[in-house]
Amino acid sequence: MSQEKQIDKCLIFTSLTLNSTTLYTYDETSLTSLLNVNCSELIARELGTIDSTLESRSGGSVPINTNAIFNNKYVNLIMYYSKRLLSNNDLITIVTIVDDRLLKEFVVHVLDKVLSKFIDLKARIDNSNGNNNNSTGSINSHDLSEFKNDLEKIIKEEESKYIRNLQ
């Protein structure tokens, strides 16, 4: 499968934040290395606006108005996000950049799955610490690396299912 075909079947760059602090990023380097834009900067530019919406549970999309070039061809990129405000006021946000041809329902499904998995991890950590009001400080490096593997696994598995269903 050519790289040009893959860009419309994959999450290009994904970032998960807790209280506006980036905890995880997933970078499909085979794609981002051929883009003329910095995906991390694109997300950083929009994160404040995304986080400032008042709903405790929301998701949406932000068009990326840039002349993105992938493999010497113009592509239209879009940013999708999902976020949850927990009862202790921790704000968890996941944002991804994709080609605008990628099915929205697929992207939302993957974001919600990753977000749910992280919320479960956070609840488990908070409960094991005996305090349901812990924030960023309660997540240690072992927990971070454990979830990084989960994040990558979820994205890869869901992309594989998506590609199989298209065939």
Image (spheres, rainbow, N blue to C red):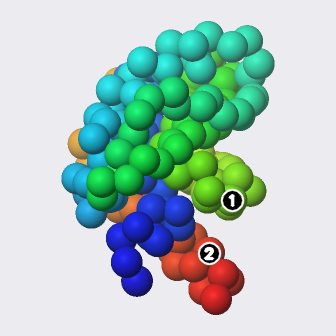
Q: Which residue is mark 1?
A: 103
Q: Residue at x 73, y 12 (%)?
A: 54
* Residue with the most extreme front position: 73
Q: Residue at x 68, y 83 (%)?
A: 165
Q: Amino acid at mark 1?
A: Leu
Marks 2 & 1, CB-CB < 8 Å contact: yes
Q: Secondary structure at mark 1?
A: loop
Q: Nearer the viewer, mark 2 or mark 1?
A: 1
Q: Up-down: is 107 above or below 156?
A: above
Residue 81, position as x, y percentages in the image: 61, 36
Mark seen at residue 123:
none
Q: Residue at x 49, y 21 (%)?
A: 47
- The span from disc 2 to disc 1 (Cα, nearest Å) is 9 Å
Residue 67, position as x, y percentages in the image: 41, 34
Judge left or right: residue 134 versus residue 83: left
Q: Amino acid at mark 2?
A: Tyr
Q: Secondary structure at mark 2?
A: helix
Front in this rendered view, residue 39 or 76: 76
Residue 127, position as x, y percentages in the image: 54, 39
Q: Residue at x 51, y 27 (%)?
A: 65
Q: Up-down: is 17 above or below 157?
A: above
Q: Quadrant of residue 4?
A: bottom left
Q: Is residue 39 visible?
A: yes
Q: Which residue is mark 2?
A: 162
Q: Quadrant of residue 55?
A: top right
Residue 74, position as x, y percentages in the image: 42, 47
Of the image marks 2 and 1, the number of the one nearer the N terminus: 1
Front in this rendered view, residue 143 or 8: 8
